Image (cartoon, rainbow, N blue to C red):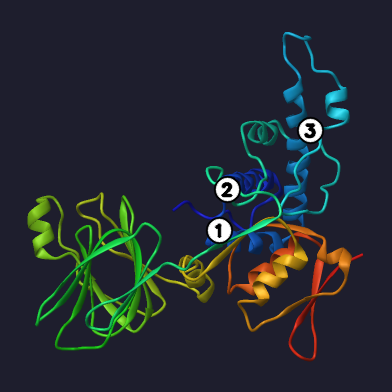
Amino acid sequence: MAAEPSNAESSANLEAIASVWLSRRDRGLTPAEQDAYLEWLRADPRHGAMIAHLEKTWGALDALAEWRPAHSARPNPDLLATPRARPKRWARLAKFPCAVPTLAAAAAVALGIFVLHSISRETPMPTGTVRVIPSPERLTLEDGSVVELNHGGKIETEFTAETRRVRLVRGEAHFTVTKNPARPFIVEANGVAVRAVGTAFNVRHASAAVEVLVTEGKVQVERPVAAIVSSRVQSPITPTALVAGERAIVDTTAPTAQLVVAAVTPTEMARALSWQGVRLEFAELPLAEVVTEFNLRNRQQLVVEDAATGRLRVGGSFRADNVDAFVRLLEASFGVSAQRRDDGALVLRQQK
């Protein structure tokens, strides 16, 4: 997974980092990236301002699509004076102070760093619509253990009187294991084994690595002898115990690689597991209707204070139960404040 843009960038590279975020927004933010993007916006007022600046630059460059070299040696200045109308964006941000963009930033925008919704181009949504993406597949195994499969994930099971074995063929899965000390629960993925008795953990089988994240209890990560013999190139991994809040990554392309273990914060864990649960995708839907969708699925209720605020158009992808992230987006990108009422509801109002 690509490294997240830093929150501690200098003025010199702020444009480059903002360009990375714009690129990700063009191809569609994952829920985890969306949370990280919102945190980045909130970290410094310059971040949102730079995003707006690059959006404006892109709008101007887009107008040059009307010009062809065959028509004239240079573009008509009117093309930049009155850009053609653009679809409303999912984030409306503060304007950056007038400054000439660097050549690198302008080139990045011209090469395709566009600002659209975090919705797949292959499956476009009509404006003013909502899509509800069901929660991942949930399986209950014969011993009572529960597996949540990320979309596209696949497992195979082999239970005996002595052991409970699950092979993660591809993708990602979260396991909540029924405790049984007499029958260890073992998950295998690309030559890496995760052994547990009664615990909860997440395993991601990527093309070049296996990642294990412990959400409850503890597990042991190792490379079984059988896997070493079959591959003839891999070396053993010293069995390593992980506890809740720790993540281990094994580079499966390097025969001698050992585990890289690191602690994760609650925020990082939430990002890693953000694929769980129902997701909502909006395409330029009025805020009043978006709030209705969230309120149907959450105890935390939202209230739109006035009709003008309710008419704001919103687009993006969110976990249906992540009201906080949605409110952060409104505060960071739409100039909407959220005030808590005595009954606990959050009142949304567009700041004047």
Would you say residue 331 is visible in this rendering? Answer: no
Q: Residues within 10 Å of mark 1 (few under 14, many from 20)?
A: some
Asked if labels 2 and 1 touch by Cβ distance under 8 angstroms, the answer is yes
Work out whether 292 lies above or below 217.
above
Q: CA distance from mark 3 to mark 2?
A: 21 Å
State how far apart marks 3 and 1 are (Cα). 27 Å
Give the residue pinned by disc 2: 24
Q: For the view shown, which residue lies furthest in the bottom direction?
A: 342
N-terminal-most mark, 1 or 2: 2
Q: Position of residue 101 (x, y in %)?
A: 76, 36
The disc at residue 320 is none
Q: Is residue 49 above or below residue 61?
A: below
Q: Residues within 10 Å of mark 3 (few under 14, many from 20)?
A: some
Judged from the image, the secondary structure of the residue bearing numbered disc 3 is helix
Q: Disc 1 marks which residue?
A: 33
Q: Nearer the viewer, residue 311 or 62?
A: 311
Q: Residue at x 51, y 76 (%)?
A: 266
Question: x, y (%) of residue 216?
Answer: 37, 82
Identify the amino acid type marked 1.
Glu
**As drawn, is 112 to the left or to the right of 254?**
right
Q: Are marks 3 and 1 in contact (CB under 8 Å)?
A: no
Relative placement, left or right, of 232 versus 2 is left
Looking at numbered disc 3 in the image, what kind of residue is underneath it?
Ala
What percent of the width, then of the height, locates residue 241? Answer: 27, 77
Residue on which disc 3 sits: 60
Residue type beneath disc 2:
Arg
**Secondary structure of residue under mark 2:** helix
Give the image location of residue 230, x and y in percent: 9, 54
Residue at (74% x, 63% y) in the render = 332
How many residues crowd mark 2 within 10 Å: few (<14), some (14–19), many (20+)? Answer: many
Label 1, label 2: how far apart the Cα atoms are: 8 Å
- Which of the 4 image quadrants contains residue 196? bottom left
